[in-house]
Image: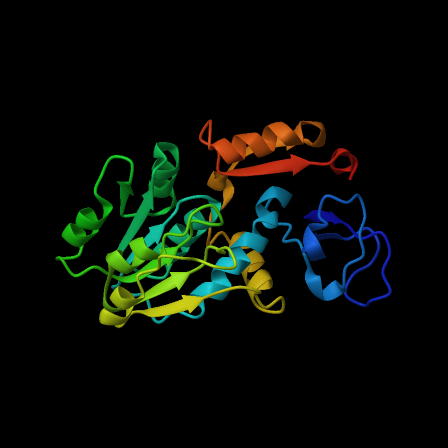
Amino acid sequence: MIGSVVETNGNRFKPGDRVLGVPFEQKGLAERYVLPEGRAIPLDTRVSEEEAMMAQPLGTVIYALRKLPNLIGKNVAIVGQGPIGQLYTTCIKNLGAKQVIAIDQNEDRLALSIEMGATCTIDTSKQDVISEVLNLTDQQGCDIVIEAIGHDEVALNLCIDLSKKFGIILFFGVPSDRVDDIRLFDLLKKNIQIITSIDPDFSIDFPLAMQWIGEGRVDVSKILTHRYPLENIQQAFELFRDRKDGCSKVLIEFPSYSKS
């Protein structure tokens, strides 16, 4: 969320400062809430507030990427091209990967992936994703496969198929408490390393993401596709849920925003 500091007993901000805040327990829809100053960062004024807000999701991506080895010359597949997948696509491009393979079943999202830096795309509704990836990697599979699907579907088995021997799977999409039918033996047989990522470092990842956006290292503007006033929030949620009209990141504007 982006908002204004109303009052503070800390030293980092003063009333009236515009900040990016990450509330506890999904309380971001509250008109006001109390937040430790360590969970807020100042906005970079070189970009719009909408772009600055993307420092939060980008920060979670940066936190995960810091766990990976050098990506220069590597073949990387990103499974899922929602807003998070798009951020991975552009970051992986900037970090020097040989191939950035964007995978999804939505044509609009795959078209956006090319703009965000993908070297190629695979439409899982029309193509055999495993054979396509093998063809792109001399039948070896990818050095790194990133699972960015999210809650609705766990694609870990697909990631195992796409990974080369001794490859790495970055499991970013948050699964349910229990996930059944994972092919663990295939995982072991390929000697694949799994890296998980949750709870970024507020002192490193979000400020660095804000810096990248402010300096123009990462262009997040293409992901910001739709904007709705608060009274149309249900329409906004349904649009994102149904993945219609080429939507990627959908913004909600509170009435107080136009007065700020």
Residue 210 relative to residue 253: left or right:
left
Asked whether 182 or 44 is in front, the reply is 182
Residue appearing at x 50%, y 65% in the figure:
63
Q: Is residue 176 left or right of residue 183?
A: right
Relative image position of residue 25 (x, y in whole percent): 69, 55
Where residue 206 appears, as percent x and y from the top left, is 59, 61
**What colouring style does the render use?**
rainbow
Residue depicted at 27% across the width and 67% down the height:
185
Image quadrant occupied by the C terminus: top right
Total of numbered circles in the picture?
Answer: 0
Q: Is residue 23 visible?
A: no
x, y (%) of residue 136? 17, 52
Expressed as whole percent of the image width and height from the top left, the position of residue 173 reads 46, 55
Residue 67 shows in the view: yes
Please name whichever residue, 94 or 244, is drawn nearer the observer in this view of the structure: 244
Q: Residue at x 66, y 32 (%)?
A: 233
The answer to which of 53 and 133 lies nearer the viewer is 133
